[in-house]
């Protein structure tokens, strides 16, 4: 994913509409509700109850419809799907609300005392000022309310100077307030747009950083898995699944050091398949590979004690490392291995010792007390294995 450094015009417009509705349906609507109730209380002595209730009902229904429309638009994310259509609906609501206030003042002013006119005018100015903080996030929305609420009252006051002398002052002040609110709204609107753009960019950067972090975690896991796989490939014999010569030498060195530190014994069993070359010549190399695989399975099952490691040392030779095993345990383990191989009943008509596959084993048990090279131990076990083969194969020689 490529980071987008600036918010697009469509995204910015959608974000403005979202913020307008989130704030406007509570703050702006609440101020209009309170103002409507205040007007009813203010005009109670001068108009009939029926007239006031009809007026209040009209205002409350309009405000309720606007609030429901905003809630639905937010729930359906209309500001993302069709922002222009939503915008004009919102502007229409602002126009109607502003028109109700200006028509109310113009209709009421000639019939109430001057003090009541000023209080009513103050209520409308307060509503407009409060709306500025909420509506100006979409400037056109606020201007629609401003030019249908205060501006018509100011213009009407100037036009009707001869009816009431104070209309000149009212008209001039209201037009000045409109001009001031227009200037302030432009400034606040620009600040809102900058704030929204900055917030969007920060969120985009946070999302990008989160995705990059997740991607790095995935890559790290993949690298670790690949490293483990490479390690396995480097240390595991592909045919049998046992450890290879490299792993055996590494483990043997560790076990020598551990046995020396703890003063314990260490045993090795070196294993060779009897007459394996003749087996390959008789049955073919694929059959020979199968014998090696089956022998690998047997060795895997035989390593039941903790720390025991079985490996293929090369060709048909296998090795079993038995940490902490004395000569008696090592001997019994070798005998069990020989029995398990015989129980496989793998035919070998070319064998010089049996009609089935057998193994020869050289067993070595030591108590390391100095710096011993693993190769020396392997050579000693190999010498025992050589002796077993020299004595006729299918036997165990322990040293």
Image (cartoon, rainbow, N blue to C red):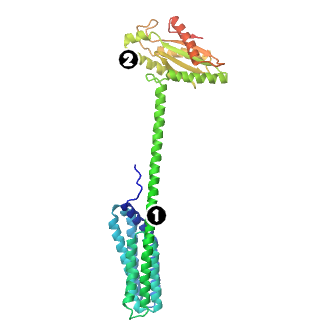
Residue at 61%, 15% in the rendered image: 365
Considering only vertical position in the picture, is 376 above or below 233?
above
What SS does tag 2 mark? helix
Across and down, in percent, residue 338 comes to 51, 14
Of 315 and 208, nearer the camera is 208
Considering only vertical position in the picture, is 73 above or below 164?
above
Across and down, in percent, residue 26 comes to 45, 71
- Residue 291 in sight in this render: yes
**Of callouts 1 and 2, which one flags the residue occurring earlier in the amino acid sequence?**
1
The quadrant where residue 187 appears:
bottom left
What SS does tag 1 mark? helix
Q: CA distance from mark 1 to mark 2?
A: 74 Å
Q: Nearer the viewer, mark 1 or mark 2?
A: 1
The quadrant where residue 92 appears:
bottom left
Across and down, in percent, residue 388 comes to 53, 8
In the picture, the disc for residue 195 is 1
What crowding class fits label 2: few (fewer than 14 Cα within 10 Å), some (14-19), or many (20 or more)?
A: few
In the picture, the disc for residue 286 is 2
């Amino acid at each position: 994913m490529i980071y987008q450094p600036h918010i697009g015009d469509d995204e910015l417009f959608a974000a403005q509409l979202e913020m307008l509705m989130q704030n406007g349906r509570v703050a702006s609507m609440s101020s209009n509700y309170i103002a409507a109730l205040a007007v009813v209380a203010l005009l109670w002595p001068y108009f009939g109850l029926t007239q006031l209730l009809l007026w209040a009902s009209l205002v409350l229904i309009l405000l309720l419809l606007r609030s429901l429309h905003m809630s639905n638009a937010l729930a359906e994310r209309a500001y993302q799907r069709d922002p222009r259509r939503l915008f004009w609906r919102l502007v229409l609501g602002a126009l109607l609300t502003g028109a109700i206030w200006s028509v109310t003042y113009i209709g009421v002013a000639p019939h109430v005392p001057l003090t009541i006119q000023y209080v009513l005018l103050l209520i409308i100015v307060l509503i407009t000022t409060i709306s500025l903080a909420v509506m100006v996030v979409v400037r056109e929305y606020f201007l629609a309310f401003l030019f249908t609420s205060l501006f018509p009252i100011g213009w009407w006051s100037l036009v009707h100077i001869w009816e009431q002398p104070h209309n000149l002052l009212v008209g001039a002040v209201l037009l000045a307030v409109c001009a001031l609110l227009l200037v302030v709204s432009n400034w606040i609107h620009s600040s809102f747009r900058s704030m929204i753009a900055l917030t969007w960019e920060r969120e985009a950067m946070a999302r990008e950083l989160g995705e990059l972090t997740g991607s790095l975690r995935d890559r790290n896991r993949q690298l670790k898995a690949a490293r483990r796989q490479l390690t396995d490939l480097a240390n595991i014999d592909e045919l049998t699944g046992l450890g290879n010569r490299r792993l055996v030498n590494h483990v043997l060195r560790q076990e020598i050091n551990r046995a020396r530190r703890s003063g314990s014994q260490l045993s090795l069993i070196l294993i060779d398949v009897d007459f394996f070359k003749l087996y390959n010549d008789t049955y073919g190399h694929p059959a020979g590979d199968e014998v090696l695989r089956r022998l690998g399975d047997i060795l895997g099952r035989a390593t039941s004690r903790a720390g025991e490691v079985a490996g293929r040392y090369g060709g048909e030779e296998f090795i079993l490392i038995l940490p902490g095993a004395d000569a008696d345990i090592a001997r019994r383990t070798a005998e069990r291995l020989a029995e398990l191989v015989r129980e496989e009943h793998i035919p070998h008509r070319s064998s010089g010792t049996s009609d089935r596959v057998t193994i020869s084993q050289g067993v070595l048990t030591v108590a390391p007390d100095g710096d011993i090279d693993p190769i020396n131990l392997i050579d000693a076990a190999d010498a025992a294995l050589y002796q077993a083969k020299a004595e006729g194969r299918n036997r165990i020689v322990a040293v």
